[in-house]
Image (cartoon, grey):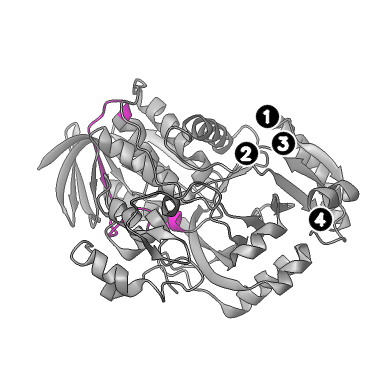
């Protein structure tokens, strides 16, 4: 049975960031994931925004982690070849109630240390966003809100962890746990491991894993579904900023924004549900999201929707992050990481390392990630790429081969999609699936013949 200093349960964005942090700091790390590939739970569907924390709860752990995560991403993104589109965000008020809420939101932003916000009247908003519906009343700009690639960031954290000695085990669902003296024995579907410290970062299954570890859970996961519609690439020209509504107490609301991949998305919804695995799409909700998008950007009415997706956020009975360390039991719980997890992941990892008392180490290895942003110098422009396999997203055969031989290679079509964007374009894989089947034969642990688990 293999022995480690730290066993992390759950390879979402937070689990990958934790593995990176602890591996760089010198710990022997194993990252356990029950699915065939990483990012297969809550982390596979989000709006890909790097938040400043301007609207996070004041004086909260969530705010601290967002600010620390944002700062570290900005610091390391060039070294890891990760995109950062500093487009800024506009918070928009459309009625009297929302206009009345703006001063409070701006005061909260300043209290949260985001002091560079800029109040805007209707005329200045329309100059900044010429396609915006003219009935907009007022708003403010948050200059440092940005867009990133939600998957290459997590893969970069994972690859760096592996290069520092961390081990990834997929198809390793936790089935039993025993605390034996100063060590844990964890039984998984991929064999047993032993570790001094266990970090529960299981996302949508966080309370379930907590009960396996301790016999009970002090929080309850309440899955919250978010549906998105994705517009074809010409629609991206309609929005220069991330367009945010005045948030409610429950949700940040429906966002309209470009993606670094050159599309435009509208979403998410915020729907409570019981299932932790099924994020189904609803046709009426899709039509409602399109209508919402068109009330914000009327010209969207002439653009085509090419895809839709839904994700589940691991909300709990409380709004804040559920992070707790019980070092006498060798256990840290990282639960309730909702939509801000992408922004906060690096900050959460540093916070947990501090809770454990780990001395900060220096990274010795820096993976250079494939750049998939629309405006970047993509691989299809470079010589020797083997030709284009996916013509919608201009994915080369060299990029596919690289994803299947990476420090943590793709184990499924869904994993390959998130590493390369193959099949994620206008035809949704109609033109390239046959070639992909040939290229990946015998390489995946989840064969393509099973179908695409991300497809609805």
- The residue at which mark 2 appears reads as 53
Task: Kindly check if marks 2 and 1 are in contact, taking CB atoms under 8 A apart as contact.
Answer: yes
Task: Kindly check if marks 4 and 3 are in contact, taking CB atoms under 8 A apart as contact.
Answer: no
Q: Residue 435, image x and y in percent?
A: 30, 71
Front in this rendered view, residue 248 or 145: 145
User: Closer to us: mark 4 or mark 3?
Assistant: 4
From mark 1 to mark 4, how far is it between C-alphas? Answer: 30 Å
Which badge, 2 or 4, is on the more N-terminal residue? 2
- Considering only vertical position in the picture, is 185 above or below 325? below
Which image quarter: residue 452?
bottom left
- The residue at which mark 3 appears reads as 109
Q: Residue 10, image x and y in percent?
A: 33, 49
Q: Residue 266, image x and y in percent?
A: 63, 63
Residue 280 appears in the rendering: yes
Which stretch is magenta?
24-44
- The residue at which mark 1 appears reads as 113
Q: Secondary structure at mark 2?
A: loop
Which badge, 4 or 3, is on the more N-terminal residue? 3
Front in this rendered view, residue 388 or 342: 388
Residue reaching furthest front?
383
Which badge, 3 or 2, is on the more N-terminal residue? 2
Residue drawn 35% across and 27% down?
356
From mark 4 to mark 3, how far is it between C-alphas? Answer: 26 Å
Residue drawn 51% across and 66% down?
310
């Amino acid at each position: 049975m293999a022995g480690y200093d730290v066993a992390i349960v759950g390879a979402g964005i937070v689990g990958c960031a934790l593995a990176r942090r602890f591996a760089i700091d010198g710990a022997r790390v194993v990252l356990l994931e029950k699915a065939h590939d990483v990012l297969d739970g809550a982390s596979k569907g989000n709006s890909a925004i790097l938040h400043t924390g301007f609207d996070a709860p004041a004086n909260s752990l969530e705010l601290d982690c967002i600010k620390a995560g944002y700062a570290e991403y900005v610091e390391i993104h060039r070294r890891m070849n990760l995109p950062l589109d500093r487009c800024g965000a506009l918070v928009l008020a459309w009625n009297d109630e929302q206009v009345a809420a703006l001063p409070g939101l701006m005061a909260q932003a300043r209290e949260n240390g985001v002091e560079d916000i800029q109040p805007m009247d209707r005329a200045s908003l329309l100059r900044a966003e010429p396609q915006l519906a003219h009935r907009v009343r007022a708003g403010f700009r948050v200059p440092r809100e940005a867009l990133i690639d939600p998957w290459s960031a997590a893969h970069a954290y994972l690859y760096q962890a592996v290069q520092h000695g961390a081990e990834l085990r997929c198809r390793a669902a936790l089935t039993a746990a025993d605390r034996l003296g100063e060590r844990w024995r964890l039984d998984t579907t991929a064999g047993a491991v032993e570790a001094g410290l266990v970090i529960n970062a299981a996302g949508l299954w966080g309370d379930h894993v907590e009960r396996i570890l301790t016999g009970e859970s002090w929080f309850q996961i309440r899955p919250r579904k978010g549906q998105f519609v994705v517009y074809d690439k010409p629609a991206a020209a309609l929005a220069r900023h991330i367009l945010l509504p005045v948030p409610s107490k429950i949700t940040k609301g429906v966002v309209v924004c470009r993606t670094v991949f050159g599309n435009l998305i509208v979403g998410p919804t915020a729907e409570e549900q019981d299932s932790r695995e099924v994020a189904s799409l609803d046709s009426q909700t899709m039509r409602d999201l399109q209508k919402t998008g068109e009330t914000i950007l009327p010209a969207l009415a002439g653009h085509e929707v090419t895809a839709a997706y839904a994700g589940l956020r691991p909300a709990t009975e409380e709004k804040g992050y559920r992070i707790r360390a019980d070092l006498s039991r060798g256990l840290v719980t990282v639960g309730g990481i909702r939509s801000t997890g992408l922004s906060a992941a690096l900050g959460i990892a540093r916070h947990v390392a501090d809770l454990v008392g780990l001395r900060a180490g220096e990274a010795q290895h820096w993976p250079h990630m494939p750049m998939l942003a629309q405006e970047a110098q993509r691989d299809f422009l470079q010589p020797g790429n083997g030709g284009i396999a996916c013509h919608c997203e201009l994915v080369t055969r060299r990029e596919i081969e690289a994803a299947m031989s990476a420090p943590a290679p793709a184990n499924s079509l869904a994993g390959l999609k998130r590493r390369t964007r193959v099949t994620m374009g206008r035809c949704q894989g109609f033109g390239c699936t046959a070639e992909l089947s040939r290229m990946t034969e015998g390489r995946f642990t989840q064969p393509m013949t099973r179908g695409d688990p991300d497809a609805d």
